[in-house]
């Protein structure tokens, strides 16, 4: 029998976790859900400082030094060619007959320009990335605050539909149908329901997102290998959630997100093998609310 409970407090997730006691995979799923909804109990003092360490390390990869690195090479060339000023124009004129090659090489260096772009341009590119997708499929690895990992498959269909299928041994599924988020336990055949507005995954679920309008942008900075956008969502159950989005240097792919819940617990989701625009089965996002029509629909889906 499918259990149905509309929850307004995330503390009940602890009851769910307690029911799945020894399995580390279940604990990791619980950690992910705590990141989505926030914990109500008082956290242990030790884990709270851990999320603060990554932001402290971010200044180690500032934009300016990356942009200035090529300049000394140019200055060195200029100094070495002072003895032959007449030869320089000839050397520059020779490549002028290959502008197409320069343009072709220059297109990928849009990555460099995005690394040095103004925050407003970076946010505009991020908005275009999210608003340009209708479906998204791929794999994920979820990393809990204590370092434990569990993988699975991600399926997204905008607006509002999302599914996390966790690899064994976890029996968990997380499904959003556009209105609610259901946390399902396949083994126990139970589910807990949450309002979708309680989650900080607006950047994935909304049909159209404006990060600066719908969330609070706290930082846009370079990260090793790409760009990081730091956000805050004050509408999350339990308080403000902090969200970090990590893109590649060209901002063509979302590589991971990191959510720190209102109590300071952190969960990272790393993404791989992402495909945008792939057709997905809408029945994957079905939630049985216990109504007669829901039960009939569930039987029909299982019979397919």
Image (cartoon, rainbow, N blue to C red):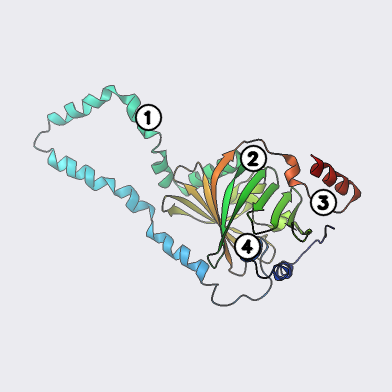
Q: Could you tell me how far apart the alpha carbons at marks 4 and 1 are, in whole angstroms?
A: 47 Å
Q: Could you tell me how far apart the alpha carbons at marks 3 and 2 are, in whole angstroms?
A: 22 Å
Q: Earlier in the sequence, mark 3 or mark 4?
A: 4
What residue does disc 4 label? 25
Q: Secondary structure at mark 4?
A: helix
Q: Earlier in the sequence, mark 4 or mark 2?
A: 4
Q: Secondary structure at mark 3?
A: loop
What residue does disc 2 label? 135
What residue does disc 3 label? 288
What residue does disc 1 label? 104
Return the residue nearer the eye: 253 or 87: 253
* Residue found 77% across the figure and 64% down from its top: 8
Instruction: Measuring from the top left, give residue 2's x and y in whole percent.
Output: 83, 57
Within the image, what quadrant is residue 57 found in?
bottom left
Q: Secondary structure at mark 2?
A: strand
Q: Earlier in the sequence, mark 1 or mark 3?
A: 1
Rendered view: 144 above or below 256? below
Q: Earlier in the sequence, mark 3 or mark 2?
A: 2
Instruction: Measuring from the top left, give residue 203's x and y in whole percent.
Output: 62, 49
């Amino acid at each position: 029998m499918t259990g149905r409970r509309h929850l307004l407090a995330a503390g009940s997730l602890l009851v769910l976790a307690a029911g799945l006691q020894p399995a580390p995979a279940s604990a990791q799923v619980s950690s992910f859900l705590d990141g989505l909804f926030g914990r109500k109990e008082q956290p242990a003092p030790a884990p709270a400082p851990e999320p603060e360490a990554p932001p402290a390390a971010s200044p180690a990869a500032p934009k300016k030094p990356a942009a200035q690195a090529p300049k000394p090479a140019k200055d060195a060339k200029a100094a070495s060619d002072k003895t032959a000023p007449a030869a320089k124009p000839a050397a520059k004129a020779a490549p002028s007959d290959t502008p197409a090659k320069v343009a072709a090489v220059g297109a990928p260096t849009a990555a460099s320009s995005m690394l040095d772009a103004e925050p407003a341009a970076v946010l505009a590119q991020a908005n275009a990335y999210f608003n340009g997708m209708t479906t998204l499929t791929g794999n994920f690895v979820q990393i809990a605050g204590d370092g434990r990992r569990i993988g699975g498959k991600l399926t997204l269909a905008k607006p509002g539909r999302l599914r996390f299928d966790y690899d064994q041994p976890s029996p968990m599924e997380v499904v959003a149908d556009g209105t609610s988020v259901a946390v399902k336990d396949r083994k126990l055949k139970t589910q807990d329901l949450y309002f979708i507005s309680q989650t900080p995954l607006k950047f994935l679920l909304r049909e159209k997102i404006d990060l600066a309008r719908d969330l609070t942008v706290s930082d846009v900075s370079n990260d090793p290998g790409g760009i990081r956008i730091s956000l805050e969502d004050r509408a999350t159950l339990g308080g403000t959630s902090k969200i970090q989005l990590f893109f590649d240097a060209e901002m063509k792919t979302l590589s991971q997100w990191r959510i720190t819940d209102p109590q300071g617990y952190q969960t990272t989701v790393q993404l791989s093998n992402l495909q945008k625009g792939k057709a997905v089965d809408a029945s994957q996002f079905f939630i049985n609310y216990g109504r007669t029509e829901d039960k009939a629909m569930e039987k029909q889906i299982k019979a397919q």
